[in-house]
């Protein structure tokens, strides 16, 4: 659907009137239209600059957010005037740990710290580096450094940050405390 793609690459959707106009030749019911738009959102690749906006907003809010994860995603979409599914799609993409990274060796601890430091600088920046994130960090470390090692470190770091959020905001299960023997067997006066 080339008429909708320019919106989707920006993380946005056309107005409902525009959607109806674009899809009118197909005579779809409301549910079929919704399913089609959902499928288009998930197959569409948003622009690098849009992903950067989502990512920087996400990690900024993640550290201070005191509500649910769902509300966090809604807030990002609202702040950026984007479709929430586009926000969710990008965040699932950056949290993904592809299987090929399992065989990628983790760099030494000092290099891991350097990668994370550069990533934090990236998140505070107003502009994107001219190269993709992994290539930019890999080249900054050394000319032959592996982009896959950078990818593995960043994917692990992002997952840890998200898990810390969930650990902090998920209700803690209450531990079952069996009644004490005194509560279980109250003393009674002997029968005379």
Image: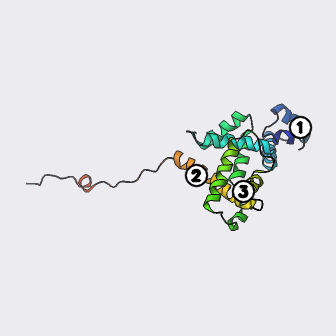
Real-space Cα separation, disc 2 to disc 3, in angstroms: 27 Å
First-in-chain label (3 vs 1): 1
Task: Name the spot of residue 24 as percent of width and height, x first.
Answer: 89, 37
Residue 141, numbered label: 3
Displayed quadrant of residue 37: top right
Q: State the residue position of label 1.
A: 22
Q: Which residue is drawn at 56% across and 50% down?
A: 164
Eyeballing the image, is 54 above or below 174? above
Task: State whether residue 31 appears in this view.
Answer: no
Distance CA(mark 3)–CA(mark 1): 48 Å
Residue 143: horizontal and vertical position, in percent?
77, 59
Q: In this view, does 96 lie to the left or right of 24?
A: left
Front residue (pair 153, 178):
153
Q: Can you identify the residue that label 2 sits on? A: 163
Which quadrant: the N terminus?
top right
Identify the residue at horizontal 77%, vertical 41% (top origin).
Answer: 50
Q: How crowded is mark 3: few (under 14 residues within 10 Å), some or many (20 or more)?
A: some
| Residue 57 tag number | none
Q: Residue furthest right?
A: 25
Label 2 vs 3, first from the N-terminus: 3
Query: Observer-nearest residue: 90 or 138?
Result: 138
Q: Is mark 2 on a helix, strand or loop?
A: helix
Q: How crowded is mark 1: few (under 14 residues within 10 Å), some or many (20 or more)?
A: some
Name the foreground residue: 7 vs 138.
138
Residue at 77% across / 43% down in the picture?
Answer: 128
Query: Label 1 to label 2, Cα distance in Å?
Result: 41 Å
Nearer-the-camera pick, 23 or 78: 78
Image position, residue 45 (x, y; %): 81, 48
One can see residue 18 in this view: yes
Q: Which colour scheme appears in the figure? A: rainbow
Element class at badge 3: helix
């Amino acid at each position: 659907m080339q008429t909708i793609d320019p919106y989707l690459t920006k993380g946005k959707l056309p107005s409902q009137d525009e959607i109806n106009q674009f899809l009118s030749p197909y005579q779809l019911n409301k549910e079929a239209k919704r399913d089609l738009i959902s499928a288009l959102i998930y197959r569409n690749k948003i622009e690098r600059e849009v992903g950067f906006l989502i990512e920087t907003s996400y990690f900024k809010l993640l550290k201070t957010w005191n509500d649910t994860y769902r509300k966090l995603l809604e807030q990002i979409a609202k702040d950026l005037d984007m479709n929430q599914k586009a926000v969710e799609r990008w965040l699932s993409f950056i949290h993904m740990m592809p299987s090929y990274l399992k065989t990628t060796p983790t760099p030494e601890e000092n290099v891991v710290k350097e990668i994370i430091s550069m990533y934090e600088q990236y998140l505070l920046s107003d502009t994107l580096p001219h190269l993709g994130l992994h290539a930019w960090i890999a080249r900054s470390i050394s000319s032959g450094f592996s982009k896959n090692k950078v990818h593995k470190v960043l994917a692990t770091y992002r997952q840890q940050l998200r898990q810390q959020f969930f650990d902090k905001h998920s209700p803690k299960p209450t531990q079952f405390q069996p009644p004490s023997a005194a509560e279980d067997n109250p003393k009674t006066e002997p029968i005379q």
